[in-house]
Image: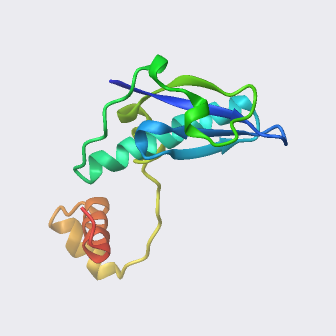
C-alpha cells in the first residue's frame, strides 16, 4: 500500500536541496541534486513510517498538497522552493532495505553442531532469537 506525504523542497546556494516533511514533526533530509533529494526523501519517509509501525505508533495523517506553503515552513525560504508528494510502499521498501537478510558464517564445536542437527534445530532462527534476546529487541 502506498503512503504519501507532502514534502517541501528547498534549493540551497551550493546546489543541494533540503527537504522537510511538515506533517512529520518537520522531519528533514537533503540531497546533492534534486534527484538525490527525491531519493533521500523516499528513504526518509519509509524509515519514519516503518519505525512508527515497529514501535506501535500511529503516523499523523498527511495534509493535502495544496494546504502546504513552503514559505511557512522555512524562515528565509529561498526562491525556487516547491511542495511535492513523496510516495512509498513501506512494506516493499522495508523488505528491500530494512529487513534484508545477510549471510553470516560462524564456528561452533562439532559435537554441538551434531547435537543440534540431530534435534532438527534451525540455526538461523536460533541465532536470530538469541541476538534479539541479548539486544532486548522484538
28 to the left or right of 130: right
Q: Tell which of 34 and 43 is nearer to you.
A: 34
Where residue 33 sits, quadrant-wise, is top right
Is residue 96 at all visible to an observer of this figure?
A: no
133 to the left or right of 32: left
* Quadrant in which the C terminus appears: bottom left
Residue at the image position 47 percent from the left and 54 percent from the top: 102
Residue at the image position 31 percent from the left and 67 percent from the top: 127
Q: Tell which of 44 and 19 is nearer to you.
A: 19
Look at the picture and state if 128 lies above or below 95: below
93 to the left or right of 42: left
Residue at the image position 18 percent from the left and 61 percent from the top: 120
Where residue 23 sits, quadrant-wise, is top left
* Quadrant in which the N terminus appears: top left
Residue 94 in the image, given as x and y percentages of width and height: 41, 41
Residue 48 in the image, given as x and y percentages of width and height: 41, 45
Is residue 117 at all visible to an observer of this figure?
A: yes
Where residue 58 sits, quadrant-wise, is top left
- Residue closest to the far top: 66
Q: Tell which of 115 and 41 is nearer to you.
A: 41
Look at the picture and state if 120 lies above or below 49: below
Residue 57 in the image, given as x and y percentages of width and height: 25, 48
Residue at the image position 70 percent from the left and 41 percent from the top: 76
- Residue closest to the far right: 14
Look at the picture and state if 67 lies above or below 8: above
Amino acid at each position: 500500500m502506498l503512503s504519501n506525504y507532502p514534502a517541501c523542497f528547498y534549493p540551497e546556494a551550493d546546489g543541494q536541496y533540503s527537504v522537510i516533511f511538515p506533517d512529520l514533526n518537520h522531519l528533514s533530509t537533503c540531497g546533492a541534486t534534486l534527484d538525490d533529494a527525491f531519493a533521500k526523501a523516499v528513504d526518509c519517509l519509509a524509515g519514519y513510517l516503518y519505525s512508527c509501525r515497529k514501535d506501535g505508533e500511529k503516523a499523523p495523517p498527511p495534509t493535502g498538497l495544496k494546504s502546504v506553503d513552503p514559505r511557512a515552513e522555512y524562515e528565509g525560504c529561498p526562491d525556487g522552493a516547491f511542495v511535492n508528494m513523496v510516495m512509498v510502499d513501506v512494506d516493499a521498501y522495508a523488505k528491500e532495505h530494512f529487513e534484508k537478510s545477510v549471510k553470516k558464517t560462524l564456528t561452533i564445536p562439532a559435537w554441538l553442531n551434531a547435537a543440534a542437527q540431530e534435534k532438527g534445530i534451525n540455526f538461523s532462527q536460533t541465532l536470530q532469537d538469541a541476538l534479539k534476546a541479548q539486544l532486548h529487541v522484538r
